[in-house]
Structures are given as structure tokens and as C-alpha cells.
């Protein structure tokens, strides 16, 4: 996903520019949102006046919504802030710093392209004594909203840079060319952006230039490389003047702005190309960032073709072994020199010999039960070999040779739909590939080659029948020995990963490690596991069994036979990876009898299904938060508890939440989530434990995992997969996961559901789910408490002096408390109705905190000017000063003589700001004679 941010000045002087941005967004919706690019658009507006600093932020992923929002933006009217309407900007500098600081609240992991559109300079740091009201409001806003204590522009930019790294490109569109251009040139250069100024201030010119600029950017994203700037591109941005930022230096603070002269206009084509190159780099190809380059590709291709010739009888067995040995020696020599490739070449001459020995002759194969399936493979392989031999160009072109290898598997494919990134299938992590659709739709050879990247195979691209798919998965039919043998041979090299990468749109010769294995497991998981209960059709079962067979026949290196008999679980492995290991573990030879299965396979299968359920719960929590909260509230009986709770709140008045375990299990068992999980688990069990589609598995979900319903309740309360584990760093910085042990050696999944641990988790889950409701209750309670406090203070002020003194200690904690301030306010309100003697007596107690020598409350330090709080008559003034002199009450703040810091970290050498201010006080009430 690409994040596009417009930071828009909506002060009174930006009338024409605002209309231009509206036109730009309207065109953007029609063009960019219709392209295969995931886009997030954020509109930030800023303005100000003497009343305050006004900044808004609104984000959208839907083009129609962003267009409707922008159409409603008006000058001097921050969206969503009706109290700030008519905020026209105040002084000439504006609050750009506050607007830029909004970047600190955005997702830093997204590649972000921002445009600051303004016509004025920002407020610069000046002494507060000469700062305008607007400047002071912006400083206060920065501190309150973002914790920014240093309002220097370049300090704020440093924080943004630290947060985003190189994933942000900030461009400045500055109207009115003046001395401010030097400052904005430094801003743009800091983030690899451009500084441009419109040649004219018409809305049409701004819209046309911005759309032209964005169109060229997105064209580079789709092709994943910066395109040279054409005459057409230059024509589209002719409304802008680009400035050369090469000589611009980055100031460390606003005090160093003098180091840069005003920038001069540069060559638009070169500066535009640099911008496209920079933005294309930050968006990047997620596949290319993780890909590696294959080695000796031609040797791998020739090796597989030699094996294929031997399997179909086009080459004598001894010749096949002799030639295969030559290629294998070369490949293993390369692997020995590089740790990265050491496990890639797993095929050995013993594997080739076994494949040739196990493969029946063509006449024997044609007479078998599955003659039609095997014959299709023989015809396909022979045709591919003959085409390869006749194609002279393929002898030297790796891409053409890979297409020849791909033809060997044309008869056995699963057609998939994967999420796309910039128009190509998204393979950030093949083990976690999100397969959204799987079909047995038959592809034509032309369509198959188009998906492999052969643009000449079909002039019109994919046929209409197959346009809904963007990926295909090779697989072997369980009834087809030849297809299985070919796939097994290819899995011992890099070829299957290379073909998978070719379909994903990767450059020829590059691939992601484990691409084929990862997508095979993800494909199998997507066919069997669904978010809704779904029965599979006959062809889907056939594909699932064939995909499981494909996983089992692969040659997997780096594992001994004994290590493959164990299945280690960890909460960070993708479910597809765990399923791949389990399918490999449950090979047909290991499933001879039910008794043998119960002895050896029950524990790893039970562990897998718990991890699978935990991953489903975690996904449920993340992508359907509302549905999760509704299920948990029903499961825990929260709605009934609230209905009968009386004046007490079930969450605010407790720290745990007890619930009926039987009700929780019953609610979960009947939920759509549990039904979908049960059907998915049953589907997985059938493929894992049944020999073919017609047989039933050896176990049901209940037989394998009797307490799955209770454990599902536990997982719903735990939420995250990692909550069942603790991690520990071992040697070589490896992370080791161990099960979490609670309450005298009990695994967290073995704790009773009515235990304190799960009641605490239930409380936390409900607090998160009912956050808005809790805030409303807290607000109501706070208002009630405040009302009761005010009534109590009013009664205390009007009470006789004796009652006032007796109840004062229970009402006021100290002179810094809120009750103390409310008392002073109440005394001021009633100063006209109270007698002067009573008023002065109560004030004397409030100022000193004492009646005679008896302490009533902790008054803290003496107020330096109590006469400014409330008028004091001469008698009271004299009495107060006399008490101070008689008791030698300190007039300044004193710390320990040892200079030892107090609990706030302050001491004589490092006083608090308040203490320092008191020390500088020239004359106080107490020192006036």
C-alpha cells in the first residue's frame, strides 16, 4: 500500500490553491484508484487565529469517500471543528509545524509521499515576550498533542525522519517565490523531495500539474523502476517550476537558516526523474527485496531435461546417469562454495537412479488403470522435449529455456487468485501467501505461457475465462508416476522456485527461497480452511489430495529421517509452514495401522491443530474486531450481567470477571466461528489421514482433540498465539519458544477456565471491547463526583466558623488540591453575603492551615500574595504577618541541607521551576512592613 498525504494550507490567502487540490483529487479518483495500486490518501488541513491552532487529519482508502470529503473543504473552516470557523490565519507566518507534526501519528511502515501546499513561511522560534498569540498557540498545541518541547522546525523534522527512515518523500509546493524558498528547499531536501512553485495560481494549472506528476510516479511504481521522463511528462508538469536542491545544505536548527541562499530553477526533466527514482525506491518491490539470484540456471535446466528424456524413454538409462552426473557435479561444486546455496541442490545421482528404476515403461503404463492421466503426461513431456530440441534460440536464452521446462508441467496445474501489489502477485512471504481463490479451470497453453511472462504467446493477454486468476501452482497427480517423478527431480534444484517466481512477475533468474514449498502449503490450506463452514466439491477434494501428494514427494534437504519424525511448534511460524511439516510427517508409509498412528502421530497432530486454532483466533481478533467482541460478550455473559448489575458496573468495580464456564463453552460451540473452524479441521484431517478421497480419516476432531471446545474458549481469551509461550534468546541470537507455565507447573492451556488467570483475561478483553462504554460511565461518575464536591464546598463555605474548621481537614488534603481551589472560588462568590468577620476568619485558616497552633491541613508553602486571592482587611493582614513572624514560617522553598534530591529529583542545586521562581520573587505580602 502507498500512502499519499496532502498537507493543505486553508488560510484565507489559499483560495485558488484549494480549488486546484479539489480538482486534483477528483482526477486522482478517476485515474489512480482505478489502477492496480493499493492507495491510502490522507488530507491534513491547517489554519489558525488568535483563538488557537487548528489542524485536522482524515484518511481514506476509498476514492469516492476522499472525493466527497475534499469537495466539502472550505477556506478558514477546519473540517470537523465548527468552533474554529472563520480562522483566517492571523499573522503572516502560519502553523506549518503543527501540520507537519501530524506525520508523527501516521503509519511509518507504509511508503509515504507527502505534498505540503502553502504560500507562507512557518512561525520561527522567538522569545515568548515578542511571540504572537498564534505562535504561542502552536507551541502549546505541539506540546499537548505530540509531546514536542522544542518547537524548532528542524528538531520536528528530525523526529519525523527518525520515525519514517527513508520511507517518506516530502515535497513542497510553495506559492509566491521569496526568501522563504531557502527554508522550504532545506525541508524538501531533508526527505528527498522536490521544491516546486506554480507558474500561475489558477486551480486548473495546479490540478493539471499535480495529476501529471502523480501519474508519472504511479507509472514507475507499476513497473517497479524509474522511467525516463518523456516530452509528454514534461508537458504535463509545465505549470510548475522545479528548483535545483543540489547546493542546499540541511541546517541543524532555525538559527542556521542563513547557510542557504534562495534556490534557482533547475532542469525539470532531470529533477522529475530524480523524484520518480526516489519514490519508486521507497515503494519498491517487496519480492525483489527478499529475492536471491539463481546460479548455473542452464545446467539445472539441462539436468531436468536429461532426466525427463530418461523417464519417457528418449534416452538410454546409462546415458542419462552419465550426463546427469556431469551436471550434478557442477551444481554441487557451486553449492559447496556458498552457504546460501548449500541446501538448494538436494538432487543426487541416487535420486535420479531411483526415479528411473521406479518409472514403468510406456507400454506398461498405457495398460494401467490410470492410463489416460499418465498418457497425457507422456505426450506433454515428449512434446516439450521435441520443441526444446528444435528451438535454437532456447539453447542460449534462460527465459526461453525456463518456458521449455514449464511446458513439462502444463497438464497439472491449480489456478489461483492472490492479492496483488503494484499489479503483480504479492509474495512478501510465500509461507503466508493469502490465496483468495483456487480453481481447477483448464488453461490453454497460450494462457499458461502468458502467466509465465511470455508476452508473445497470446496477443490479447489472458482469455476471458481466466482473467480472474493471476497465479498458477504446479502440482503432481497421485495417479501419475511420471508427473510425480518430474516434480520430485525439479524439487532437488532451484527450478520450481524459479518457475514460481516467474509467474509472480520476477525477473528471470531470481526467486524467493522456498517459494514453491510455501505457496504449495498456502494453496492446500486455503482449499481446506475457510472463514465460513463450507463443504468441498469432488474436484476440490481431488486437488487437495494431489497438493498433499505434491508436498510429500518433494526432496527436502537438511533434515535427517529422525528429525522429520518430530514436529516442533512455535507461535511465529505461518500455519502453512506447520502444515507443510505435518504433511511431510504423515507420509503414507507411516500410516500403516490406526494403532501405530495413535502411538506416533497423535501428539504432533494435536499440537498442529491447537496452533491452527490459535492462528484463526488471532486473525479473527485482527480482521473482525467487532465480530470478536460480540462473540466474547455473549460467551462471558456480559450483557446479562450488565442488565442485572444495579448501580455497580461489572468492569469498573472489579479487577476480574467471573463467568459461567458451561455457558461460555455452549455459546462458542454454536458460534459461526467455531463451526467454520470445526469444518476446516475436519477437512484437514481427511487429507492428512485418509489415503484417498473415498476413505474416511482414522480420527475425528473430537477423537484427536476431545477438549477442543474448551480450548477454543481459552484461545479466544488469550487472543495472541504468543500468549501460550515464553521466548528466550539462545546462542547465535536464536529465539527459542517454550510453553508458558503458570500456577505450580501447569501449562496455561491446562488451567481451568474458572481460574483467576482466565477471569483476569476475561476482564481485560471486556475492558478493551467496552472502552467507549467505560469512558461514558467514567465521565458520568466524574460529573456526579464533581457535583457532589461542589455542593459540599458550598455548604462548608456557608457553615459557621466552628463547623468550617472541624470539617476542613476531611475536605482538604493540601493547599494544592482541587478542593482548596474550589473553596477559594466559593468564598469569592459569597464574599458579599458573608459577614466580614466570618469571611476574614475563614480566609485566615485557609492561608495558614492552622487555628492558633493547631494544624488543620497541610498548607504547603505560604502563598506569596494571599491578598491577591481575596481582599484582606488591615486587621487580618496584621494578624497573618504576626503569625508568620512568631512561628518563623519560611518565605522561600527550602530543600535538605545535604543537597540530597527529594522524590521528585529536586535539590538546592537543581530546584524545581516553581521553587526557582519563588527564590527570585522580589517582595511578597509577608515582607511588606
Image (cartoon, rainbow, N blue to C red):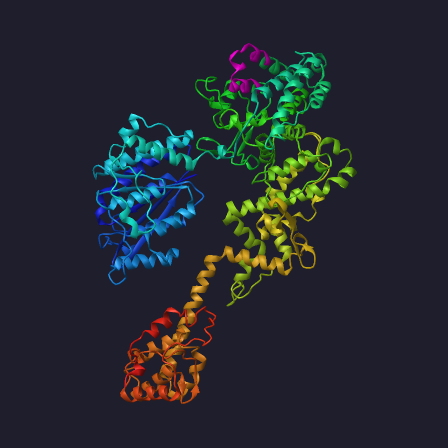
Camera-nearest residue between 226 and 145 = 226
Q: Determine the main secondary structure of the stretch shown in magenta.
A: helix
Is 530 magenta? The answer is no
Report which quarter residue 408 is drawn in. Answer: top right
Q: Residue at x 42, y 35 (%)?
A: 281
If the image is split into quadrants, where does the C terminus sit? bottom left
Q: Residue 482: x percent and y percent?
A: 66, 19
In the figure, residue 233 lies in which quadrant? top left
Q: Please identify the quadrant where the N terminus is shown.
A: top left
Count of labels in the image: 0
- Which is more toward the observer, 163 or 593? 163
Camera sees residue 182: yes
Give whichever of 15, 685 is nearer the camera: 15
Q: Is residue 257 left or right of residue 716?
A: left
**Image check: 646 left or right of 575?**
left
Using the rendered image of the protein, determine whether residue 31 is visible from the camera's viewpoint.
no
Q: Which residues are magenta?
A: 385-405
In the rendered image, residue 654, in percent from the top left (x then y), is placed at: 55, 65
| Quadrant in the picture for residue 377 | top right
Examine the structure image and report whether residue 399 is included in the region drawn in magenta.
Answer: yes
Q: Nearer the viewer, residue 475 or 95?
A: 95
Question: Looking at the image, is 766 positioned above or below residue 370?
Answer: below
Name the spot of residue 768 as percent of width and height, x first. 51, 56
Identify the residue at image location x=39%, y=57%: 147
Residue 821 at x, y = what percent? 36, 75
Horizontal relation, residue 897 to residue 31: left or right = right
Amino acid at each position: 500500500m502507498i500512502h499519499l498525504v496532502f498537507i493543505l494550507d486553508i488560510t484565507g490567502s489559499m483560495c485558488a490553491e484549494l480549488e486546484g487540490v479539489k480538482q486534483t483529487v477528483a482526477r486522482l479518483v478517476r485515474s489512480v484508484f482505478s489502477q492496480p495500486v493499493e492507495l491510502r490518501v490522507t488530507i491534513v488541513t491547517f489554519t489558525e487565529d488568535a483563538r488557537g491552532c487548528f489542524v485536522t487529519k482524515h484518511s481514506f482508502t476509498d476514492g469516492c469517500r476522499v472525493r466527497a470529503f475534499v469537495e466539502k473543504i472550505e477556506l478558514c473552516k477546519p473540517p470537523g471543528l465548527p468552533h474554529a470557523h472563520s480562522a483566517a490565519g492571523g499573522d503572516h507566518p502560519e502553523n506549518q509545524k503543527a501540520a507537519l507534526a501530524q506525520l508523527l501519528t501516521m503509519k511509518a511502515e507504509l511508503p509515504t509521499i507527502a505534498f505540503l501546499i502553502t504560500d507562507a513561511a512557518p512561525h520561527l522560534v522567538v522569545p515568548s515576550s515578542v511571540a504572537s498569540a498564534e505562535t504561542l498557540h502552536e507551541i502549546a498545541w505541539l506540546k499537548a498533542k505530540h509531546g514536542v518541547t522544542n518547537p524548532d522546525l528542524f528538531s520536528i523534522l528530525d523526529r519525523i525522519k527518525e520515525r519514517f527512515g527513508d520511507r517518506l518523500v516530502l515535497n513542497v509546493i510553495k506559492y509566491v517565490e521569496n526568501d522563504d524558498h531557502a527554508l522550504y528547499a532545506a525541508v524538501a531536501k531533508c526527505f528527498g523531495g522536490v521544491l516546486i512553485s506554480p507558474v500561475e495560481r489558477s486551480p486548473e494549472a495546479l490540478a493539471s500539474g499535480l495529476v501529471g506528476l502523480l501519474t508519472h510516479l504511479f507509472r514507475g511504481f507499476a513497473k517497479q523502476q524509474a522511467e525516463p521522463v518523456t516530452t509528454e511528462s514534461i508537458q504535463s508538469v509545465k505549470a510548475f517550476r522545479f528548483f535545483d536542491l543540489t547546493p542546499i545544505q540541511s541546517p541543524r536548527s532555525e538559527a542556521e537558516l542563513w547557510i542557504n541562499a534562495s534556490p534557482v530553477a533547475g532542469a525539470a526533466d532531470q529533477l522529475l526523474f530524480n523524484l520518480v527514482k526516489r519514490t519508486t525506491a521507497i515503494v519498491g518491490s517487496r519480492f525483489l527485496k527478499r529475492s536471491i539470484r539463481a546460479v548455473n540456471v542452464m545446467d539445472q535446466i539441462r539436468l531436468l531435461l536429461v532426466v525427463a528424456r530418461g523417464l519417457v524413454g528418449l534416452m538410454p538409462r546409462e546415458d542419462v546417469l552419465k550426463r546427469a552426473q556431469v551436471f550434478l557435479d557442477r551444481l554441487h561444486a557451486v553449492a559447496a562454495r556458498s552457504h546460501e546455496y548449500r541446501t538448494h541442490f538436494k538432487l543426487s545421482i541416487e535420486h535420479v537412479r531411483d526415479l528411473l528404476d521406479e518409472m514403468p515403461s510406456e507400454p506398461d503404463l498405457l495398460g494401467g488403470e490410470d492410463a489416460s492421466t499418465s498418457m497425457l503426461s507422456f505426450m506433454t513431456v515428449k512434446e516439450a522435449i521435441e520443441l526444446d530440441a528444435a528451438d535454437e534460440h532456447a539453447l542460449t536464452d534462460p527465459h526461453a529455456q525456463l518456458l521449455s521446462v514449464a511446458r513439462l508441467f502444463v497438464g497439472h496445474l491449480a489456478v489461483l487468485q492472490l492479492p496483488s501489489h503494484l499489479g503483480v502477485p504479492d509474495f512478501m512471504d510465500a509461507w503466508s501467501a493469502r490465496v483468495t481463490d483456487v480453481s481447477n479451470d483448464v488453461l490453454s497453453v497460450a494462457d499458461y505461457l502468458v502467466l509465465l511472462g511470455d508476452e508473445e504467446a497470446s496477443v490479447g493477454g489472458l482469455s476471458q475465462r481466466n482473467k480472474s486468476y493471476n497465479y498458477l501452482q504446479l502440482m503432481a497427480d497421485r495417479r501419475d508416476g511420471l508427473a510425480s517423478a518430474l516434480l520430485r527431480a525439479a524439487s532437488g534444484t532451484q527450478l520450481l522456485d524459479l518457475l514460481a517466481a516467474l509467474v509472480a512477475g520476477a525477473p528471470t533468474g531470481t526467486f524467493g527461497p522456498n517459494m514453491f514449498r510455501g505457496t504449495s502449503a498456502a494453496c492446500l490450506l486455503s482449499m481446506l480452511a475457510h472463514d465460513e463452514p463450507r463443504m468441498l466439491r469432488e474436484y476440490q477434494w481431488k486437488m487437495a489430495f494431489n497438493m498433499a501428494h505434491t508436498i510429500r514427494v518433494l526432496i527436502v534437504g537438511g533434515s535427517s529421517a529422525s528429525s522429520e519424525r518430530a514436529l516442533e511448534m512455535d507461535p511465529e511460524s505461518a500455519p502453512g509452514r506447520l502444515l507443510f511439516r505435518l504433511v511431510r510427517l504423515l507420509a503414507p508409509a507411516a500410516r500403516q495401522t490406526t494403532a501405530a498412528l495413535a502411538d506416533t502421530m497423535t501428539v504432533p497432530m494435536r499440537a498442529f491443530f491447537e496452533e491452527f486454532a490459535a492462528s484463526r483466533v488471532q486473525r479473527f481478533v485482527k480482521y473482525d474486531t467487532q465480530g470478536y467482541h460480540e462473540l466474547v460478550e455473549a460467551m462471558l455473559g456480559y450483557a446479562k450481567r450488565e442488565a442485572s448489575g444495579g448501580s455497580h458496573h461489572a468492569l469498573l468495580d472489579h479487577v476480574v470477571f467471573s463467568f459461567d464456564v458451561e455457558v461460555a463453552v455452549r455459546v462458542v460451540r454454536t458460534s459461526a466461528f467455531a463451526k467454520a473452524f470445526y469444518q476446516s479441521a475436519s477437512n484437514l484431517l481427511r487429507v492428512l489421514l485418509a489415503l484417498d478421497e473415498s476413505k474416511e480419516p482414522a480420527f475425528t476432531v473430537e477423537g484427536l482433540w476431545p477438549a477442543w471446545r474448551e480450548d477454543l474458549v481459552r484461545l479466544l481469551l488469550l487472543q495472541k498465539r504468543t500468549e501460550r509461550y515464553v521466548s528466550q534468546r539462545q546462542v547465535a541470537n536464536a529465539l527459542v519458544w517454550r510453553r508458558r507455565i503458570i500456577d505450580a507447573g501447569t501449562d496455561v492451556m491446562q488451567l481451568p477456565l474458572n481460574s483467576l488467570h482466565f477471569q483476569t483475561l476475561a476482564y481485560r478483553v471486556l475492558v478493551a471491547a467496552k472502552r467507549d462504554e467505560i469512558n461514558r460511565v467514567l465521565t458520568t461518575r466524574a460529573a456526579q463526583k464533581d457535583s457532589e464536591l461542589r455542593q459540599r464546598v458550598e455548604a462548608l463555605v456557608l457553615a459557621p466558623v466552628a463547623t468550617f474548621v472541624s470539617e476542613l481537614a476531611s475536605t482538604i488534603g493540601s493547599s494544592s488540591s482541587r478542593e482548596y481551589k474550589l473553596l477559594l472560588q466559593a468564598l469569592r462568590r459569597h464574599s458579599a453575603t458573608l459577614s466580614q468577620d466570618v469571611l476574614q476568619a475563614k480566609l485566615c485558616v485557609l492561608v495558614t492551615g492552622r487555628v492558633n497552633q493547631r494544624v488543620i491541613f497541610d498548607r504547603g508553602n505560604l502563598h506569596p500574595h494571599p491578598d491577591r486571592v481575596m481582599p484582606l482587611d488591615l486587621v487580618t493582614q496584621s494578624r497573618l504577618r504576626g503569625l508568620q513572624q512568631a512561628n518563623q514560617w519560611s518565605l522561600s522553598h527550602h530543600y535538605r541541607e545535604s543537597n540530597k534530591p527529594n522524590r521528585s529529583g529536586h535539590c538546592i542545586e537543581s530546584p524545581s521551576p516553581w521553587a526557582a521562581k519563588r527564590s527570585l520573587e522580589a517582595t511578597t505580602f509577608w515582607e511588606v512592613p
